[in-house]
Amino acid sequence: MSMLALGLLFGAVTLVVMFSGMPIAFALGTVAVGFMYFFMPASSLDTITQNVYEEMASITLLSIPLFILKGSAIGRSPAGKDLYAAMHVWMGRIPGGLGIANVFACGLFAAMAGSSPATCSAIGSAGIPEMRKRGYSPGFAAGIIAAGGTLGILLPPSITMILYAVAAEQSLGRLFLAGIMPGVLLVVLFAGYASLRYRSEHRRALAAYKDHGAASALLDVDRFTLRQKMEMLPRVLPFVILLIGVMVALYGGFATPSETAGLGALLALVLIALIYRVWKPRDVAPILAATLKESTMLMMIVGMSLLFSYVMSYLHVSQSTAEWIVGLQLSRWVLLAAILVMVIVLGFFLPPVSIILMTAPIILPPLKAAGFDLVWFGILMTIVMETGLIHPPVGLNIFVIKNIAPDIALGEIIRGVLPFVVLMLLAVALICFFPGIATALPDYVMARTGQA
């Protein structure tokens, strides 16, 4: 069979199995084993376990369950509600302060928990009812939480970036650092839109009040005393200190990513025990069960994806495809645009983990040959994949929000998130024009610490 025919067959079978409804891990494993049976030596079947083990025997991957434990501990405590309440109190006087508070709370919680669904659930369960009570439109309230939750895969510790570091063979420390400024950029863009949207809704509410006497909670202004503001800090500051401590340990060269993940998980468990009295076995058991479930699911996807990539490489499908892309002699920016569009389309159907591990062997060699920095591209790819979390048909964050606020129509939630999709694509354009947004911080820190 020719290489072209083999490649087309491999792609077609993968699509058929993926769309059959089979779980992603088993779908990828089935395709990999099937092609090993028909197109590889019979002895290769005896090495499946060994191949999966060797691919997963990475000290970097060890940090995944530890970061998941840290996120689960924080996510299943009232820390998210306390963080949101503190942001609300401190930003109450700013026009659109409630919406901005949601954005900042999502950003901080995402940096602590490293999970998009956990961020949506923890902040949204408090933020959405509060915004609606204050007169904000349901679609805007849902959209800002769904979009803010996407920061969980961009801001460190990000499971998505850990897997990209493994797939692209890049420094995890550089990737984590490279995600900070783009994350701040998205927070600023989201907060700016929240302020503008508030002003628009406030003008409409004021006009309705003047014309028809229709009162709106949006016209009320919250006023908090300094004492009330200070009372909110004791429960929030320990988690912010934890976030800062983990970053200092990682980037100061005091600990490896895996050691930092273990330290963060342990400290998170200690904090929820001290602050929220979550220490009894019946309280801790759901945290450990959720960690075990999510870690097992994710590691199964990782293992089967890496086996899938190994089979593609053995059969020269990935190399031939990469050579074909290079042979098209596209300009470097057309190549980048085509690959990002492909990632967007894949995001209609697949989660970020699968997209990274399935496409990395194909898209990274042409990008490297075109002279692109793979750490910089990892940030672009992550932001593009973030849009997949808030647009249908997968849109994981959309369905998390729907579960939190079932009375908000799905169409209204989708309309609420579309402006944030546009803002994410704007961020991608800005990082393309000004790559220093992603690369300046890691270059500076690594130069100061003497790391590669």
Image: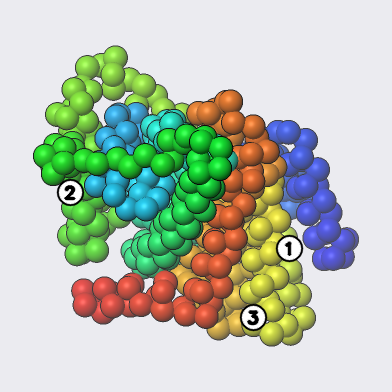
Q: In which quarter of the image is residue 11?
A: bottom right
Q: Mark 2 points at which residue?
A: 241
Q: In which quarter of the image is residue 174?
A: bottom left
* N-terminal label among 2 and 1: 2
What's the residue type where badge 2 is placed?
A: Ile
| Nearer to us in this view, 323 or 249 | 249
Inspect this view and state whether residue 84 appears: yes
Q: Name the residue under label 1.
A: 317
Describe the element under mark 2 as helix, strand or loop. Answer: helix
C-alpha separation, residue under disc 3 versus residue under disc 1? 24 Å
Marks 2 & 3, CB-CB < 8 Å contact: no
* Disc 3 crowd, CA 10 A, few/some/many (<14, 14-19, 20+): few
C-alpha separation, residue under disc 2 versus residue under disc 3? 41 Å
Q: In which quarter of the image is residue 66?
A: top left
What's the residue type where badge 1 is placed?
A: Val
Q: In the image, 381: left or right of 221?
A: right
User: Which residue is drawn at the image coordinates 51% and 67% (left, top)?
Assistant: 427
What's the residue type where badge 3 is placed?
A: Trp
| Nearer to us in this view, 92 or 163 | 92
Q: Residue 129, position in %: x, y? A: 44, 30
User: Which residue is drawn at the image coordinates 74% and 68% (left, top)?
Assistant: 321
Question: Which-is-in-front pick, marks 3 and 1?
Answer: 3
Q: In the image, 255: left or right of 25?
A: left
* N-terminal label among 3 and 1: 1
* Disc 2 crowd, CA 10 A, few/some/many (<14, 14-19, 20+): few
* Disc 1 crowd, CA 10 A, few/some/many (<14, 14-19, 20+): many
User: Which residue is drawn at the image coordinates 32% and 33% (left, top)?
Assistant: 81
User: Which residue is drawn at the image coordinates 60% and 82% (left, top)?
Assistant: 370
In the rendered image, which quarter contains the C terminus?
A: bottom left
Residue 333: numbered disc: 3
C-alpha separation, residue under disc 2 versus residue under disc 1? 48 Å
